Amino acid sequence: MSSDAESRIGQLKGALRLEMGRLLSGLDSEARAAASAAIAERITNSEQWSTARVVAAFVGVGLELDTLPIIECAQRQGKHLLLPRCLSSTTLEFAEYRTCDVLESGRFGIPEPMADRPAESLRGIDLVLVPGLAFDCFGGRLGKGAGYYDRAFAPMEKQALPVLLGLGFALQVTQRVPMTTLDISLDAVVTETAWIKTRTFPT
């Protein structure tokens, strides 16, 4: 990809981040809670969830959906639950989070697994719940710009990838997310109103 094309995509991503930030800021706490609960119900009642032994989730912060119901469900059902941990400005790893654990504040103030929990192989994960600012119906995802998930999963062979589900509110689904060859594609996007299949993927 040429530098001009990369620059153009970067500009489009920046504009979309601003737009999504505006939309998310307009979502009140009551609507956010209701939508988060609906998303959790869709996820935890799905076949993909029921067959997954190892699940990587995330802790929703700020304007993101509340993922606590999903995390609690995983713990109740005895799933091996992993949460992301930022090692540096470029590197993301996943470590176990147990019911008795205390989450520590990591980079950007995001709660992370305790430092003494060892990192686990990405190849052992069955299902990854992926945060984002914007999603589309083609598997496109727009993050906050650090590229953590892209760097973690893009190098993996397709056959070794876990199921990647983007989680977000319906208002975060846009017509098309600008993507580069370095950006990972999602298997599906789950919102409070729909399960959006983006590849050949059962729902």
Image (cartoon, rainbow, N blue to C red):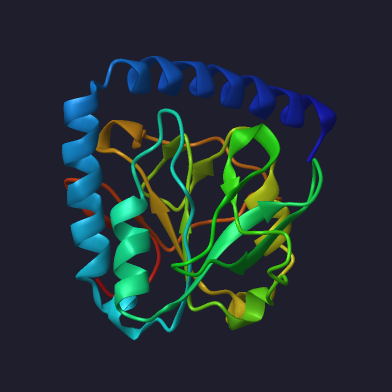
Task: Tell me if 179 is positioned left or right of 73 in this view.
Answer: right
Relative to 173, does residue 52 appear above or below in the rendering? below
- Residue at left offset 65%, top offset 19%: 11
Quick one: quadrant of the C terminus?
A: bottom left
Residue 36 spot, x, y in % from top left: 25, 44
Relative to 162, does residue 66 appear above or below in the rendering? above
Q: Nearer the viewer, residue 134 or 56?
A: 56
Whether residue 181 is visible, yes or no, is: no
Task: Tell me if 159 is positioned left or right of 87 in this view.
Answer: left
Q: Nearer the viewer, residue 154 or 51?
A: 51
Whether residue 109 is visible, yes or no, is: yes
- Residue at left offset 55%, top offset 77%: 125
- Residue at left offset 83%, top offset 29%: 3
Relative to 13, does residue 165 appear above or below in the rendering? below
Residue 58 spot, x, y in % from top left: 49, 53
Residue 91 spot, x, y in % from top left: 78, 52
